[in-house]
Image (cartoon, grey):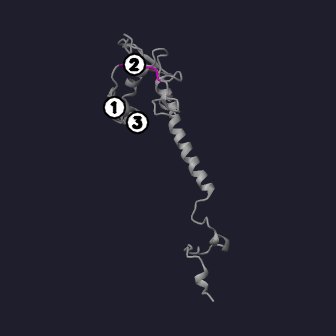
Amino acid sequence: MAHPQATRSTRASPPPLQGATPAARQSRFRGVPRLGDLVLVLFLLLTGSLAFAADPPSKATRVPQPVVEPARGGQCVEDPAIMRRNHMELLKHQRDDTMRGGIRGAKYSLKTCIECHASQATNSVAATPTNFCVSCHTYAAVKIDCFECHATQPQKTSSLPLAQPVPAGSSIQLGQQQVKP
């Protein structure tokens, strides 16, 4: 009688899977990836390569950029990239210097910005959607609260003095009181 080991084939069988069902342990496709996995990988590779092929790199973006009317002045007080990122901080510091120290007309004053960036069509920085301040702040979804107090148009220059001198000996009426200068 032949030994039971001698009648078996000499082909080596893979080690059984631990914790697998008996049918899975006997499957001949145990080391082969499933068809669904292969289809998923091919699909991802194909769609990724099509996305790169369909959209070559260009200057156009999917998000529309703000439309800004050109400024009146020439060179800005800082580089445009610095102003885009930091103008609010520069204006806040200038505000503090003006309110607390009385320093007016400095490099980063709001008045200087308005004089340079007011639209030539509307003479304002906040009258229409394409005006300088409104255009960028709408794009960035930021509320502009500067113009709740400040003018959106540059001051008109006039030759008249701001205050008229009071002739000597006359009086000024303030409310119910009369005041002599």
Q: Is residue 92 left or right of residue 62?
A: left
Tell me, yes or no, if residue 141 can be seen here: no
Whichever of callouts 1 and 2 sits on the residue coming sooner in the sequence is 1
Q: Is label 2 or label 3 in front?
A: 3
The chief SS type of the magenta part is loop
Q: Closer to us: mark 1 or mark 2?
A: 1
Query: Mark 2 or mark 3, which has the lower sequence index?
Result: 3
> Please, what is the three-letter code of the amino acid marked with disc 3?
Arg
Residue 180's label in the rendered image is 2
Looking at the rendered structure, the kind of residue marked 1 is: Gly
Q: Is the residue marked by circle 1 packed among few (<14), some (14-19), or many (20+) residues within 10 Å?
A: few
Q: Which residues are magenta?
A: 68-73
Mark 2 crowd level (few <14, some 14–19, many ≥20, 10 Å Cα): few
Residue 85: mark: 3
| Residue shown at 55% from the left, 44% from the top | 46
Mark 3, other Cα within 10 Å: few <14 / some 14–19 / many ≥20: few
In the image, is residue 119 above or below residue 107?
above
Question: Which residue, as the protein is rendered here, is positioned at the far front?
Answer: 1
Q: Where is 177 relative to 144, above or below? A: above
Q: Is residue 105 above or below residue 72?
A: below
Residue at mark 1: 102
Which residue in the rendered view is the most extreme toward the top? Answer: 159
Residue nearest the viewer, comparing 16 with 164: 16
Looking at the picture, how far across and down is residue 10, in whole percent?
Answer: 55, 76
Residue type of the residue flagged with mark 2: Lys
**Is residue 71 on the magenta stretch?**
yes
Whole-angstrom CA distance, mark 2 to mark 3, is 52 Å
Label 1 – label 2 distance at C-alpha: 29 Å
Give me the C-alpha separation between circle 3 and circle 1. Answer: 26 Å
Q: Which tag is nearer the camera, tag 3 or tag 1?
A: 3
